[in-house]
Image (cartoon, grey):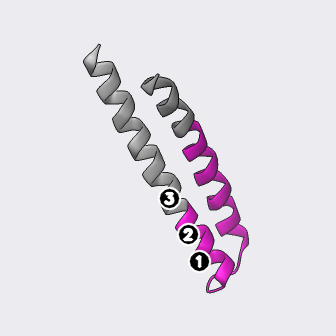
Amino acid sequence: MVGLIARAGLAFGVLLTLAATLLLLSLPSGTAESSISALTVGLGLFLILISFTALYIERKRR
């Protein structure tokens, strides 16, 4: 069950990071939208890190 949730989190983190990165490339820097997009990229990367950690622990336990 943990592995399934971690895989879903990984997929969501990758989608979030890619979408926010593409948006960052198209927005002018210094705007509020670019700040929110940069924060979203950071949150997506954090979600990817947490998901990888959960998957690693789950696979090591088996």
Check the image and report above or below for 32 versus 23.
below
- How far across and down, in percent of the image, does residue 32 sit? 65, 83
Callout 1: SS: helix
Asked if residue 38 is positioned above or below residue 45 in the image, the reply reads below
When asked about the image quadrant of residue 14, the answer is top right
Residue 21 belongs to magenta span: yes
The local secondary structure at tag 2 comes to helix
The image shows residue 8 at horizontal and vertical percentages of: 56, 33
Circle 3 — which element? helix
Q: Kindly report the distance in space between the C-alpha atoms of the residues bearing marks 1 and 3.
A: 12 Å
Q: Which residue is mark 1?
A: 35
Looking at the image, residue 41 sits to the left or right of residue 56; the answer is right
Residue 60 relative to residue 16: left or right: left
Which residue bears the numbered disc 2?
A: 38
Q: Are marks 2 and 1 in contact (CB under 8 Å)?
A: yes
Q: Amino acid at mark 1?
A: Ser
Q: Main secondary structure of the magenta part?
A: helix
Q: Residue furthest right?
A: 26
Q: Indicate which disc, 1 or 3, sits on the residue closer to the N terminus.
A: 1
Q: Of label 3 and label 2, which has the lower sequence position?
A: 2
The magenta-colored residue range is: 11-40
Q: CA distance from mark 3 to mark 2?
A: 9 Å
Residue at 58% x, 37% y: name it: 11
Hey, what amino acid is under mark 2?
Ala
Amino acid, disc 3: Leu
Q: Kindly identify which residue carries mark 3.
A: 43
Residue 48 position in % (x across, y down): 46, 45
In the rendered image, the quadrant that contains the C terminus is: top left
**Residue lying at 68% horizontally and 59% vertically, measured from the top left:** 22
Q: Nearer the viewer, residue 24 or 61?
A: 61
